[in-house]
Image: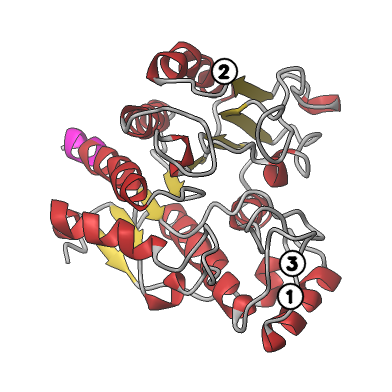
Amino acid sequence: MPMSSKVCVYVGENLGRYGFGDGHPFGPQRMDAFWQESLRQGIPNRVAVMEPVMADRATVELFHKSHYVDQVARQSVTGEGYLDYGDTPAFKGVYEASLYVVGSTLAAVDGIMSGTFRRGFIPIAGLHHARPDRAGGFCVFNDAGVAIQALLTNHGLKKVAYVDIDAHHGDGVFYPFESDPRVIDADIHEDGRFLYPGTGHAHETGKGEAEGLKLNLPMAPFSDDKAFFEVWPQVEELIRHTEPEFIILQCGADCIAGDPITHMQFSLAPHAHAAASLCRLADELGHGRVIGIGGGGYNLRNIGGGWNAVVNAFVAAEAARG
């Protein structure tokens, strides 16, 4: 393991436990799909492989309400019922599994902020539908929301960018920070008229002091690479204009052609391009801080290909720095 690498990847059994059984689309095999492809490509020889880290409750409550954390902890014991209105079932150990998702994302953030790393990737993460007070869309604790709040509160950053290319709109990040001018949000997703959660309209550009700092780019079903590359320059323009001090990329693989629950038709190229572009922008801004969080994706081959395209782009960006 090349600990001198400036790219860290968090994998391990504790992270892989976040998944729902009984044929649920978000199954526990998703991390293995990513990691087996990583091994095939020799990626572990080029990154720092890190063990998952468990968050403490206080960290989770940077974003989530205490009563909701209590609910997850209770239902984690029995493994019964749903944590939302029917998408996100409880399972025994869901509380601890969710803490590992948050903790691993936060460990990558802290490693980058300390200068130990410059880029990081966490495959089972990017749970962007969870709201402060409830679960949603297979997401229990919103590690992205926690990470943003930690960067603002614990690390004292003035601006953080969240970029989301998952097929589903990142409603659990967008709306809690909709009026916060410190959070730059750019989200490319399938039009909410055709896909859960039904949000993320183009006219939603932020409220109050944050007006114009949020960018929703809904795409027609069956949009392909051409459509992605037509709108991506708007994301770059927003990042250049706002100059964030940290960039989070939620890189759900469900926008890749062949996903069983979405209609998008991207190849692997958008994942590679988004990651490379954000690394370049972060380097131009002088800090280089980028993490990738896996997000959705329910075709195992696409998970392996899309997420490793992101990691490869991170590694290539580091190699280019010399």
Is the residue marked by circle 3 packed among few (<14), some (14-19), or many (20+) residues within 10 Å? some
Q: Is residue 319 magenta?
A: yes
Q: Which mark is residue 72?
A: 1
The residue range painted magenta reads 317-321
Q: Residue at x 35, y 46 (%)?
A: 307
Return the disc, 2 or 3, that comes first in the chain's sequence.
3
Return the disc, 3 or 1, that comes first in the chain's sequence.
3
Above/below status of 216 relative to 319: above
Q: Position of residue 28 (x, y in %)?
A: 45, 68
Distance from the alpha carbon under mark 2 to that under mark 3: 31 Å
Return the disc, 1 or 2, that comes first in the chain's sequence.
1
Distance from the alpha carbon under mark 3 to that under mark 1: 13 Å
**Left/right of residue 218 with respect to residue 198 in the rendered view:** left
Amino acid type, callout 3: Glu
Helix, strand or loop for disc 3: loop
Name the residue tied to disc 2.
241
Name the residue tied to disc 3.
61
Q: Which mark is residue 191?
A: none
Amino acid type, callout 1: Val
